[in-house]
Image (cartoon, grey):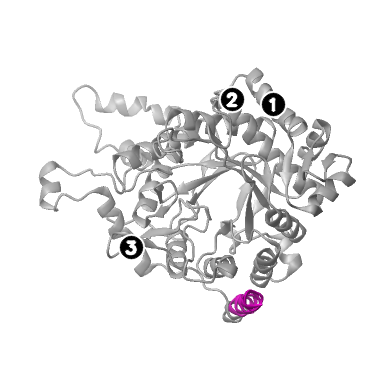
């Protein structure tokens, strides 16, 4: 069973907007978020941030390292966020327009474990795994941009981020969005790598081939490392994804409303920081509101209607605030590509048709992003293609209604041989991995599961697809940069 590769990037048309919140509820969440930032504020261990906000007239408690923001200041900074911009690919034909009309999918990340393609069991992930998965995703038209799907755990922790960016830059021409580089040292290294590929500082600023993920620690704490990284990336013209991962009953109130208010407050706090440091910098507002498993105290692996509703509502609020946004899609708490994985992935895919964001993250992830599966990546791409076709819509003109062909075939006839049918039959969606065989054919084939078919396709793609390589001199420069930063990091570690 084959698929065409690599093909143009597919996107979800952002056509539908089924609002799960009333305008009054959107306003209450927005007002609640502003009230949280004014009354409670954020904590930080960044003296630079404390000084910066004091210099801009905000209520700064240096002793307790707390910043409280005036609502007017928050709204002033929010208004600086550009709604439309481009996330560049290494190849221009893989650029992504962030414009409120297109939605793009990425693999999940950053899993510390991977399903081994040969053994079929989970194991610690490596740099080679990340390169292989990135090369696979480069071949998939459903994947618009690349997260670091797995961690390069066989590299030194101090410079792991740089190894991850290096291998991904070598393995795809698509845009990278990475959580690598969350302190000043590694952020400078990531910028140096990207400039080497883009062709210099000005070229990178004009065409940012990477965007950076920076997370607030819920509830309401900004660590010094991400603050420094945000400043470095913004100065380099690299878009920054501000991420909140608040969890109801744990790091957020035990209600959907409280979870949403805190999530929006945390995202807005990141926007304020970014646009105080670099007014007008490109930002992607990313909310992953979730619920706690009340039995274990951990993330709810059986995430259901509460999580889905909160995700849709978060996107609705961010869209109402006219902010580019990202959300989760297709991720699952299941350990295998089974009924639970399919059900959770399908529900999240469907919800994102009706309240879509600009970017979607989660393909290929198992066990709530703790394990990555290449076979699951392809199965998730099939589901994404399903909802893309759904969202693209259908024509209802005279040619498609087909009164003439109905009259020609008449009662008790058959439409298969008609030119009208041959002309339009390719418009119907067809599955690649979902089983379409008869029971007898399925038994004769050894009773394959869709994941078995997907795994075979993974092996074919890895055997056949090679992304456009970097120039040899550029690849050598990336290796030199990583080696230099690694030597510096290890020298300081020895000291």
Residue position for label 3: 116
Residue position for label 2: 257
Q: Look at the numbered discs 3 and 2 and tell me whether their residues touch, using CB distance below 8 Å.
A: no
Which numbered circle lies on residue 468?
none
Compared with residue 231, is residue 267 higher up or lower down, i.e. above or below? above
Compared with residue 190, is residue 491 higher up or lower down, i.e. above or below? below
What residue is drawn where x is 40% and y is 63%? 124
- Does residue 233 appear left or right of residue 371 in this picture? right
Q: Quadrant of the N terminus?
A: bottom left
Q: Is residue 218 visible?
A: yes
Q: How many numbered dots are placed on residues in this image?
A: 3
Residue position for label 1: 32
First in residue order: circle 3 vs circle 2: 3
- Does residue 297 appear left or right of residue 355 in this picture? left
Q: Look at the numbered discs 2 and 1 and tell me whether their residues touch, using CB distance below 8 Å.
A: yes
Badge 1 crowding class, 10 Å Cα cut-off, few under 14, some 14 to 19, many 20 or more, is some
Q: Main secondary structure of the magenta part?
A: helix
What residue is drawn where x is 33% and y is 36%? 420
Residue 144 in the image: x percent, y percent? 52, 52
Compared with residue 425, is residue 485 higher up or lower down, i.e. above or below? below
Segment colored magenta: 478-495
Magenta stretch encompasses residue 214: no
């Amino acid at each position: 069973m084959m698929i065409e590769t690599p093909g143009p990037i597919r996107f979800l048309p952002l056509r539908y907007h089924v609002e799960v919140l009333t305008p009054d509820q959107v306003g209450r969440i927005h007002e609640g978020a502003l009230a949280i930032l004014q009354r409670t504020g954020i904590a930080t261990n960044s003296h630079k941030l404390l000084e910066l906000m004091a210099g801009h007239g905000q209520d700064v408690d240096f002793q307790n390292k707390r910043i409280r923001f005036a609502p007017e200041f928050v709204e002033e900074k929010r208004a600086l966020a550009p709604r439309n911009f481009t996330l560049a690919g290494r190849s221009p034909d893989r650029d992504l327009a962030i414009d409120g009309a297109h939605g793009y999918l990425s693999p999940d990340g950053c899993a510390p474990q991977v399903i081994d393609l040969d053994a079929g069991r989970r194991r610690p992930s490596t740099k080679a795994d990340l390169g292989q998965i990135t090369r696979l995703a480069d071949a998939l038209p459903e994947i618009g941009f690349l997260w670091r799907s797995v961690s390069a755990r066989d590299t030194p922790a101090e410079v792991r981020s740089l190894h991850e960016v290096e291998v991904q830059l070598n393995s795809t021409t698509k845009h990278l969005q990475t959580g690598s580089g969350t302190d000043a040292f590694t952020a400078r290294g990531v910028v140096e790598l990207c400039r080497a590929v883009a062709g210099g500082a000005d070229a990178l600023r004009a065409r940012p081939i990477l965007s950076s993920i920076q997370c607030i620690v819920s509830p309401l704490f900004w660590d010094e490392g991400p603050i420094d990284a945000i400043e470095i990336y913004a100065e380099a013209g690299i878009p920054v994804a501000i991420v909140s991962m608040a969890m109801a009953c744990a790091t957020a109130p035990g209600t959907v409303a409280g979870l949403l208010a805190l999530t929006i407050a945390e995202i807005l706090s990141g926007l304020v920081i970014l646009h105080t440091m670099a007014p007008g910098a490109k930002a992607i507002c990313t909310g992953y509101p979730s619920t706690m498993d009340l039995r274990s105290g951990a993330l709810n692996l059986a995430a259901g209607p509460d999580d889905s509703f909160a995700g849709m509502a978060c996107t609705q609020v961010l869209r109402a605030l006219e902010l580019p946004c990202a959300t989760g899609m297709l991720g699952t708490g299941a350990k295998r590509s089974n009924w639970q994985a399919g059900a959770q992935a399908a529900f999240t895919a469907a919800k994102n048709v009706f309240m879509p964001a600009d970017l979607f993250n989660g393909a290929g992830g198992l066990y709530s992003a703790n394990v990555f599966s290449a076979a699951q990546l392809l199965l998730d791409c099939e589901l994404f293609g399903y909802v893309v076709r759904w969202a693209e819509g259908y024509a209802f003109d005279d040619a498609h209604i087909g009164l003439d062909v109905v009259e020609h075939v008449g009662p008790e006839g058959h439409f298969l041989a008609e030119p009208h049918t041959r002309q339009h039959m390719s418009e119907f969606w067809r599955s690649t991995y979902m089983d379409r065989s008869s029971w007898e054919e399925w038994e004769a084939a050894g009773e394959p599961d869709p994941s078995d078919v997907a795994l075979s396709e993974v092996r074919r793609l890895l055997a056949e697809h090679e992304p456009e390589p970097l120039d040899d001199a550029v690849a050598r420069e990336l290796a030199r940069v990583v080696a230099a930063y690694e030597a510096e990091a290890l020298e300081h570690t020895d000291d």
